[in-house]
Amino acid sequence: MDFLSTFLIAVGLGMDAFAVSLAVGTLSQCNNGRARFRISWHFGFFQFLMPILGWLAGSTIASYIEQFDHWVAFGLLAYIGVNMIHSGFKPEAKSFCSDPSRGRMLITLAVATSIDALAVGLSMAMLRVRIIYPSIVIGIVAGAMSILGMRIGNKLGEKFGKTMEIIGGVILILIGVRVLIEHLL
């Protein structure tokens, strides 16, 4: 697989990581360099790892995963999005009890944004494409797009406050809906 094709796939996969990073970046809990690093590292790592796992699984479990992966991604993103919207309407409320760039919430976001990469890995196995190089490119691009999303989200959050938190929640829900529509149609 050539670099341009790999890069375009990476950008396509990185869009979810960018959008989620943008939404999370609007939160006051994530307005420092360490939070940006944790999110971009985990999003990039999961985007790197999932194609490899999908490739290793090959066609043996593809039919099982394809039946519910989109529902898992939708459920995770919708849950987080609803929390952000709810928090946006209450001045004293926070979307997350703690920093979403740590712990279970970070892993949840990383998995939700990288499920599509698992399917890409499955398809690459079926096409007999070597997976390491594309996975590295996918991980780096997703990490970079996450940093960019966090930076833009931080600026928007500073300027527009709770309104951006509501918009961020809506964006997460729309990403979940898009994932559902793509897989159901």
Image (cartoon, rainbow, N blue to C red):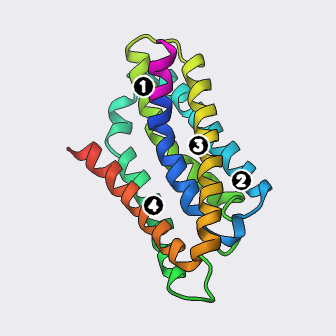
- Foreground mark, 4 or 3, reads 3
Give the Cα separation between the discs numbered 2 and 1. 30 Å
The reply to whether callout 1 and callout 4 are in contact (CB within 8 Å) is no
Between discs 3 and 1, the one toward the N terminus: 1
Say which amino acid is labelled 1: Leu
- Tell me the amino acid under the disc marked 2: Arg
Residue 103 on image: x %, y %? 71, 58
Magenta span covers which residues?
Answer: 1-8
Q: At which x and y percent is residue 7?
A: 50, 25
Q: Are marks 2 and 1 in contact (CB under 8 Å)?
A: no
Nearer mark to the viewer, of 3 and 1 = 3
Residue indicated by mark 1: 122
Number of labelled discs? 4
List the residue tagged with mark 2: 36
Q: Where is residue 127, by image quadrant?
A: top left
Helix, strand or loop for disc 4? helix
Number of the label disc, if any, that sits on residue 172: 4
Q: Is residue 181 above or below residue 53?
A: below
| As drawn, 46 above or below 30 | above
* Picture residue at 74% right of the left edge, 57% below the top: 35
Q: How far apart are marks 4 and 3 (CA)?
A: 16 Å
Instruction: Name the kind of residue labelled 3 in the image.
Output: Met
Q: How far is disc 2 from disc 4 in space, using C-alphas? A: 18 Å
**Residue 177 falls inside the magenta stretch:** no
- Dot 1 crowding, Cα within 10 Å, few <14, some 14–19, many 20+: many
Q: Which of marks 1 and 4 is in front?
A: 4
Query: Is residue 5 part of the magenta span, yes or no?
Result: yes
Q: Sequence order check: which comes first, mark 4 or mark 3?
A: 3
Disc 3 target residue: 145
Marks 2 and 4, the one that precedes in the sequence: 2
Q: Distance between the residues labelled 1 and 4?
A: 25 Å
For residue 11, above or below residue 34? above
